[in-house]
Amino acid sequence: MNLFEYAAERRKEKEAPLAARMRPQTLEEVVGQEDIVGKGKLLYRAIKADRISSVIFYGPPGVGKTTLARVIAGTTSADFHQVNATIAGKKDLEEVVARAKENLGGYGRKTILFIDEIHRFNKAQQDYLLPYVEDGTVILIGATTENPYFEVNGALLSRSRIFELKPLSKQNVLTLIHRAFASERGLKPYHADITEDAADFLADIADGDARAALNAIELAVLTTDPGSDGTIHVTLEVAEECIQKKAIRYDKTGDHHYDTIAAFIESMCGSDPDAALYYLARMLEAGEDVKYIARRMLVAASEEVGNADPMAICVAASAAIGVERVGMPEGRIILAQAAAYIASAPKSNSAYLGIEKALSIVRKTGNLPIPSYLQDSSYKGAKKLGRGIGYKYAHNYPNHWVEQQYLPDAIREERIYEPNDIGHEADIKAYFRTIGKEPKRYAFVDPSRSGRPEKPWEDKK
């Protein structure tokens, strides 16, 4: 590198975005991902021992995929090359492979090839790399925001260890924000500080994306005039303005969390799509975990709609998959469609009431004997034990139904599932009448749902 190139590189480093300047340079500076690079973990040991093998880092933006590759670059004795799959072509790969062969054959030195956005490479480009990864000419480090099992060549996957990086915790992001204000590489030369409520707001709204948080505080500092004391103060108002979002009062582990999700569920139950979408918007704007919202809609589709409209659970399940594949912000549309569908669907809680009654019976009666003609008769000697004898196969009878006792003797008169007269459940009742199996009325579980948990909307994230 000549003097002019050196000066250009130094200027580039100085003028780089804050997220790039604050990128950790050692393993000890890495924040988060303790289950992957925590002291003593496999990847930590491999990096420290400079014994890295081909790996693929998979996770959402801003969680440290490129950071880990850079840390490896700074600690390895191998020749390190980086390409971005969005702009690199086969010729770039050929040049790296040629250099790698020279390094290995002439100097016994390994070569690490880091491919950012590896899912952007087409099949031919990925196939080109395969023999060189397989014979050790290059050690591959790939980074992708897409599920590698869908986007990366299966042969490359089989020769690489996959590490899934999770979104950073709010505390992780807070640590990075405060580190940026205290670092000479960061915002310390600007004589800036940040209030706790502003830092808390930005850490929350970043939703585990360190780059988003650092970009926000950099914009706040660069667009805010110093106060009378000569210091740039980043307040909550400044933080809201720079990220164009209001700090909605919403604690993901407290009452606001439960109140909002409860209102969302009950609005769908009450067939009010307007209110359902309103509460959905409040949760999204506050940074609620979209996977959590999708899980609660799956429950609502069965508990509140059930067989009155069996498509509700299909829509909710598709939304859960879709929002995970697509991510935000487009995922909001998928969630909105599902919420509106569930809210607009005919309602039945027969499945909920049915399983509650079934559980109550099981807890009271224990393991009652199953009628012998229903027991497994597929093994040798089953007939000698009386298994399966007398069983009537429904498809051999008119309307594919035959009168036969399926419940144990002690509870043979119990009715556990009772469809109502709304939506598809009305068709179910009509089917029962057609085959002569008219459902009996019975004293059911109290539908007031007073027995629900105090906070039924919580689940393990």
Image (tube, grey):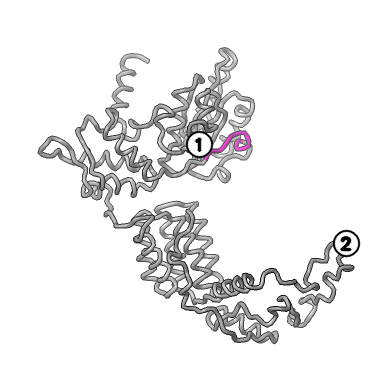
Between 250 and 114, which is closer to the camera in this rendering? 250
Quote the CA–CA distance across marks 1 and 2: 51 Å
Q: Would you say residue 159 sits in the magenta stretch? A: yes
Residue furthest left in the image: 228
Marks 1 and 2, the one that precedes in the sequence: 1
* Amino acid of disc 1: Ile
Q: Position of residue 355 (x, y in %)?
A: 58, 71
The residue depicted at 60 percent of the width and 38 percent of the height is 157
Q: Residue under circle 2?
A: 380
Q: Position of residue 217 (x, y in %)?
A: 27, 41
Q: Residue under circle 1?
A: 36
- Looking at the rendering, the stretch of residues picked out in magenta corresponds to 156-163
Q: Secondary structure at mark 2?
A: loop
Of the 4 image quadrants, the one containing the N terminus is top left
The residue depicted at 14 percent of the width and 38 percent of the height is 226
* Amino acid of disc 2: Lys
Q: Is residue 135 above or below residue 453?
A: above
The residue depicted at 40 percent of the width and 66 percent of the height is 262
